[in-house]
Image (cartoon, rainbow, N blue to C red):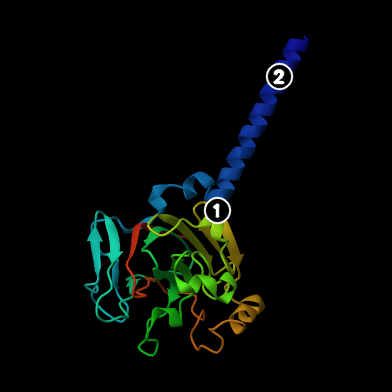
Amino acid sequence: MKQLSLLMFILISFTTCKRSQEKLEIQNTAYNIKTPGNLSSQNDWTILFDGTSFNHWRGYLSDSMPSEWSIEDNTMVFTPGDTGGKNIITKDTYTNFVLSLEWKISEGGNSGIFWSVFEDKKYREAYMTGPEIQVLDNAKHPDSFVAEGTHKAGSLYDLIACPEQYINPAGEWNLCVIEVNQTANIAKVTMNDNEVMTFPLSGEKWDTMVQKSKFNGWEGFGKYQTGHVGLQDHGDRVAFRNIKIKEL
C-alpha cells in the first residue's frame, strides 16, 4: 500500500512539473523570451569577419575599404601607411547587441574598438561620437602610464580603467566581448572571459563620467544610441579576427 501511494505521488509530481514547464515555455514564446540555450546558438550571430572578405566593412566617411587594411592568414590586419585616419566601420548600424571579437596588438601599439559611431562629415574621426574600448600594448605604449589607468587595454577609454591582469601582452590574442543595451541603459565588457566593467550609457552617472574626461563638451560623444561598430587606425599595426555580432 505504501509503495502504491509513493508511486502515485511521483506520478502526480511529474505531471505537475511538466505542466509548469509547458506553461513557462508558452509564456516565453508569447513574450519572445530566449532561453540561455538559444542565446548561445550560432544562428543568432551575424559574422562580421570570417577571415575571407570585408563584405561587412568600409572606411569611415568612405564607400570603400582603405588599402591599409588587408587579410592575412584569415585575420584582418591594419598596417599603417603614409597618412592616418583610415578607421573602418560596419556597413550596418546597431542599437542593442553583443559584439565578440579577438584582437592582437603589435609591440608598442595602440588601436581601439568603437560602437554607436555616428557618421557625419562634421565628425572627422569615429572617436568623436563612438565610445571606445582601448586596444594597447600595456607594457610599452606611453598611454598605459597616464590617466589613472583609463588608457590601458580593455578600458573604456578615458572613462573606466580595466584591471591589467585580464589582458594578454602584445603579440598575443585577446578576446573582447562588448554588450550594449540602450533600452536597459547598461553596457558590459568582458576581457578573456573575465567581466571587467559595467556602466550606464546615458543619464546622470554617464554624464558625470564624461564631464571628468577629455570628452567633456564634445558635441556628439556618446550621444547616439544607434550607430556603427568601428575599428581604429592609431598609426600602429593591429590584427582582428572572429568578429561577430548578435542583436538583442
Measured from the top left, where is residue 128 in percent x and y? 44, 83
Mark 1, residue position: 194
Q: Give the residue at the far top of this rendering.
A: 1
Residue closer to the observer: 234 or 204 = 234
The answer to whether one can see residue 149 in this image is yes
The N terminus lies in which quarter of the figure? Answer: top right
Q: Give the residue at the far front of this rendering.
A: 140
State the residue at coordinates (75%, 16%). 5
Mark 2, residue position: 8
Query: Of the residues shown, which amino acid type is indicated by label 2?
Result: Met
State the residue at coordinates (60%, 73%). 148
State the residue at coordinates (58%, 61%). 163
Q: Height in image: 73 above or below 68?
A: above
* Image quadrant assignment for residue 226: bottom left
Q: CA distance from mark 1 to mark 2?
A: 48 Å
What secondary structure is found at the residue carrying circle 2? helix
Query: Of the residues shown, which amino acid type is indicated by label 1?
Result: Asn
Q: How many marks?
A: 2
Measured from the top left, where is residue 70 in percent x and y? 23, 65
Q: Which mark is residue 136?
A: none
